Image (tube, rainbow, N blue to C red):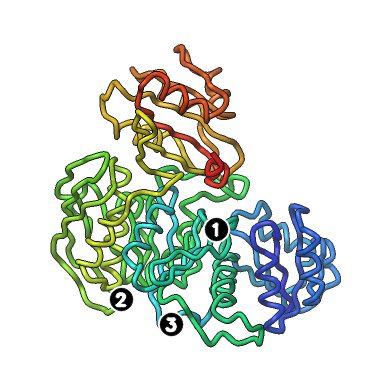
Amino acid sequence: MNVLVIDLTHGGVKIAVSLAKKGKNVYCYDIYNTLKDIDKKMLDVYNVKLIQPNDLKDFTGDLKVIYPIHLPLTNEDIKKNNRNLNYTFITHHKAVAEILNGWGRDIDKIEITGVKGKTSCAFMLKEILIDENPLILSSLGALVYEEKNEIVLQKNISITPANIKETIDLANKLANPVCNGENKNQIYNSAIFESSLGVTGIGDVGLLTNIVEDYPIAQNRLSASIAKKQVFGCRIVCCEKESLDKYYKDIKHEKVNSFSFDDESADLYVKNVEYSLDESIIDIAFKDIKTKSDETLSGEIRITTFAPGKHHVMNVLGVVGTALSLDIDENTIINGLKNYKGIPGRTNKKNIENITVIEEINPGINTKAIEASINMIDNDANYIISIGGDYGITCEEIDEDAVAKLIDTLDKEIILTGEVGKSILNKINKEVNFIEDYNAVYDFAIENNRNLLFIYRSDYRKLSKR
């Protein structure tokens, strides 16, 4: 069977090479024309050929097409190049699952998807699984922990499904530096993989954090909720109940554990929260949680952790549900989340000179996330709110009109910053400050002795250079 891998921008090279190593006859279509010279040489080494869709007219027999879930082409667009072929279509996610068939049977594996909260959940789970030397792929990089020490495998790496395989390979190279083709040593005993548009299905638990915005993908043919439906390929699914009821009520799956802030009919829900900008105390009730060992769990648990807003508490619920699903001891969950202090450069609180700064930095900041962040500081008049960001970071673009309407309703001092802030400035009806350089926003707050809520839509790597 011939294999055609489409899209070399979002991990297709890794998929193509992995399949070629298994003896498959692989072709690639570089739909975005972004193939780097070094990747082209890698494809040449493994005899992977680059083609255009119209080259399919010369093919015969079976063709397996591997495509990203957000591909702008339809199956029909591909088939019209040769209607005589026997086509099979699978996503990049499914291809990675097939490549990794049999991997990790002896460890706990978690896959995380959703519109918001994926990275926060990944690092909460890291704290819970820290004694198991977790292997992690997140938007902050490919990491592995050994004796609680962080080892950076690769910093600038996307959360495409192919990079799950890349992360595993990097960890194996670290543990087995002699290039003899064998991976006898394994330094990790658990794995946490974050993905933006669904999961591969290799997870013992698939955590779907939420679908707070069902944004369009694949040139409006599909949506985020459709892509993230892949989470139901995992052995156990932990899912926000509101998203479950709205988008997936017809899904048949034996092990789904739902969680909710307000809905007591969920399998796991909040009984009470005492908010603090340092540590919130969260009382959680759970009933009939389906677990990896085929048991069910019911009870209550009190969590003390960094969760200054409702959206952070929702992340905690998903994490607790995931950990319980894996039969992780309650004390381990409690102690792990006690150690979670937020993520520097993402959601965190810190003191700078004479002021307190709360940072909410995320590539997927949207209107609802901004509103939730503002609710954290309640009516504290000493806080300035800065809103801004950069463009072109994720598939999900910010709705500037909605943000502008929100700003018009706020009775707070607002500073807009960055490219996004400049664009929003032209859409609001009230007077606000605009400071182009986000670094100067911090200086302004310090000079005026005002605390700062800094909400910024950006790449973590860029702001980490501050």
Element marked by disc 3: loop
Instruction: Write the residue at 76% across / 62% down.
Output: 29
Residue 236: quadrant of the picture: bottom left
Instruction: Write the residue at 53% across / 41% down.
Output: 463
Element marked by disc 2: loop
Q: Amino acid at mark 1?
A: Ile
Q: Nearer the viewer, mark 2 or mark 1?
A: 1
Residue 72: % across, % down: 66, 51
Q: Amino acid at mark 3?
A: Arg
> Quick check: 405 above or below 320?
above
Residue 37: % across, % down: 81, 61
Nearest to the observer: residue 19 or residue 192: 192
In the image, is 416 to the left or to the right of 376? Answer: right
Nearest to the observer: residue 435 or residue 226: 435
> Quick check: 210 above or below 382?
below
Label 2 or label 3, whichever comes before in sequence order: 3
Label 2 or label 1, whichever comes before in sequence order: 1
Where does label 3 land, which residue?
Answer: 105
Element marked by disc 1: loop
Alpha carbon separation for disc pair 1 and 3: 22 Å
Q: Amino acid at mark 2?
A: Lys
Label 3 Cα neighbours within 10 Å, binned few <14 / some 14-19 / many ≥20: few
Q: Nearer the viewer, mark 2 or mark 3?
A: 3
Instruction: Write the residue at 80% across / 65% down.
Output: 40
Quadrant position of the C terminus in the picture? top right
Where does label 2 land, which residue?
Answer: 292
- How many numbered marks are there? 3
Where does label 1 land, which residue?
Answer: 159
Nearest to the observer: residue 452 or residue 333: 452
